[in-house]
Image (spheres, coloured by chain):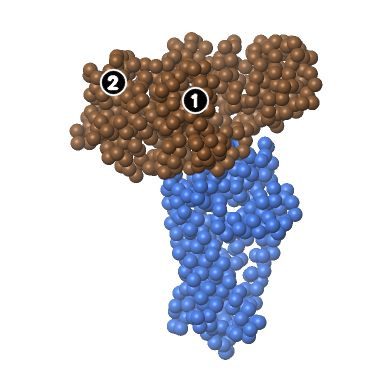
Chain colours: A brown, B blue
Amino acid sequence: MTRPENTPDIVVIGGGNAALCAAITAAEAGARVLILEGAPKTYRGGNSRHTRNFRCMHDGPLGPLVESYSEEEYLADLMKVTGGKTDEGLARLAIRTSEECLPWLEAHGVRFQPSLSGTLSLARTNAFFLGGGKSLVNAYYRTAEALGVQVEYEAKVTHLELNEDRIDFLDYTQGGKSHRLAPKSVVVASGGFQADVDWLARAWGPAAKNFLIRGTPYNRGVVLADLLEQGIEQVGDPTQCHAVAIDGRAPKFDGGIVTRLDCVPFSIVVNKDGQRFYDEGEDVWPKRYAIWGRLVAAQPDQVGYVIIDAKSLNLFMPSVFPPIKADTLEELAEMMGLPADALLQTISDFNAACGNPSDFHPTELDGVSTQGLTPPKTNWARAITEPPFYGYSLRTGVTFTYLGLKVDERAQCSIGNRPVSNLWAAGETMAGSILGQGYLAGFGMTIGTVFGRIAGREAAAHAN
Amino acid sequence: MQTDFLNEARRQAEICNACRYCEGYCSVFPALHAERAFSDGDLTQLANLCHNCRGCYYACQYTAPHEFDLNLPQALANVRQESWEDLAFPRAAGKAFQKNGVMIAAAAVLGFALLFWLASILKPVSGEGFYAVLSHNAMVAIFLPAFLFPLLSIGISLRRYWHRVGAQPLEMVHLARAFRQAANMKNLKGGHGDGCNFEDEDRFTHARRAAHQAVMYGFLLCFASTSVATVMHYVLGMPAPYGIISAPKLLGLSGGLLLVLGCVEMIRLKLKSDRQLGANKAFGGEIAFIGLLGFVGLSGLVLYALGQTSMMPVLLALHLGSVLAFFVLTPFTKMAHGFYRIAALAVDASR
């Protein structure tokens, strides 16, 4: 039992970007803040460890960002990926506030890459963290601790005791001991539930057991479930999540960015029966990347296989695991466990449908397409003929889930039609309030930063 | 070279190449991203470009306990250390001294003893100041080979390095760029100008860069002092001793102070740093080398302070003995890294 004089004003549950933004903002407003991070110190930061950039509106050149990126254009990009499934008010708030966030990040120790090589050309819309998300997290922990924020690691919050419209107590365990606190304000920023595969399977069906979890293994949605059970307002569809197709050999948890495969536009992708199932050349890879998670999830055993030949090997970012390599397609089929006859037939049909590849251009939509093939390949369609042949397996990799806590423009949670007077949510825990489906690169960090700061400000105002 | 060190560095480099989050930290990452596969020579070049600032380690989401178990600073430090041993001429001396603090100390003691012995048997009948202890000609006879041999040895090593990494013929413009980067230690600024993560986990500071600058410029000032004195002696006919307001003394005093302070700070930082992020086995050898370098500076300052007392002959032998040991060991200790670093930066500039 923690003595009352040690009770902080504000407890922030979680230790990633949104939690840290909330804690720093609240501490700067003079509140005594305690962060309860469920992970050990080496794994602190949740999915923010794996993030890379921040999508930011700007009126003119800003920090590392060039040109301008208006509210309307940003919103249009969001509308496109979500198919309109968003709360426009909250979305506009996140977008509009992002502009003032970038200097705030810099003032709190975050550093950006001046420019970027590689395949992503997002210098106008996204600011890339120097060193990636873990360096951002490190900077924030240094800043928070300098402000007197206390941090407890491996502190697992088990229950928030809701009484009418107020959180009275908060229970957590650490090192086998139970603790109960009675803070004035609580900020929940403990992510989605994607690391609880059983929960995923309840939402998705048994197929979800075959998914890989790209992000932290610590986001198990314990606090989220606890609050939803007590009737806190929820938002989002449990089957919606950020899911991409990643290297099938990636770790079950925490594989992060390196498990991505950029080779799909130059390939054919088949399922375990050796059949193609979607247009691999629909668009450039970063744009179409996110849809392949769902496409692969819909295939038997939730697995796909990418086949390329020698002429495509150096056209995409290096992969973390080397491709499977064979001198003949029969051999490749055998090495990848695919039915050779079916695969050879698929490739021969595909090759026959490929026209003249002389307009092939790897970095833009080149219109080099198949004729009379179903499904078609509408760009970069070149016959697979040049040995050696290479293959990768694909699986669905889940980054985070969208089912979460519904919040208002002050990041406050509610029960029935009234706000919970001392409960706020930020980050992936409430991202479903804005992201109904789909994903926009760097938008998770925008939501986390904007709503983290709002939650911290409101929690401090309530506590002070 | 130990293939397990190379293979471990290769494994890690391939993961880094798929991630690329660290792109802006230092010269290693753009060089790494330019390749898709890494030969032993490529890894040797990357290893010698790395300044062990550790920024990438603390930014990395794949360090242990993650199963990818990345520790690029250590992987490259091991390859770098091995490369210095392997490229040294004669190779056996590289093996003996690179990692071995005891051997460095022993060599230094030998240097002192030799100087004491020579001073006792070569004691001149006449001569002023230091030359009353050891004649000028005797000093030249001892130090000229001790200076020329290391230059020859390092020359051979650098040629081997050039060959191993498959570099183009040297061009002045690339060398100039390498010296510019070394002069302001660009690669210890962390890409954002906040410094590196050497001594206190993920906190960025300029401490190591400052300490390293003090050692480097302190050493260069001391070297300049000796060079100026040599010119004054032979060209201008102005033999030592020199007064305090003379070029050799001003250069030597400022250089000596910088060198001593830099070495003390460097050892302090090294002791605070996480040894698992460097070439662990070389730790003792590196500390011993910095100790010896610091002692060269300190003994020179003490000799200056007490040069008019009866302790002068003893102090002179200690100082000259440490200088002797330092010169002879230069190709086989941490001192060699300066030459390889310049080479690696020049090779990088040429690509």
Residue B273: tell me if it is visible.
no
Residue A78 lies, with reference to residue B99, above or below; the image says above
Mark number for residue A419? 2
State whether discs 1 and 2 lie on one chain.
yes
Circle 2 marks a residue in which chain? Answer: A
Quadrant housing residue B99: bottom right
Q: Position of residue A185 (x, y in %)?
A: 27, 29
Residue A361 lies, with reference to residue B172, above or below; the image says above
Amino acid type at image mark 1: Leu
Left or right: where A166 falls relative to A355: left
Residue at mark 1:
A75
Quadrant housing residue A116: top right
Q: Which of the pair A10/A414 is nearer the observer?
A: A414
Give yes or no for contact between labels 1 and 2 (Cβ–Cβ under 8 Å): no
Residue A124: tell me if it is visible.
yes
* Dot 1 or dot 2, earlier in sequence: 1
Q: Which of the pair B174/A202 is nearer the observer?
A: B174
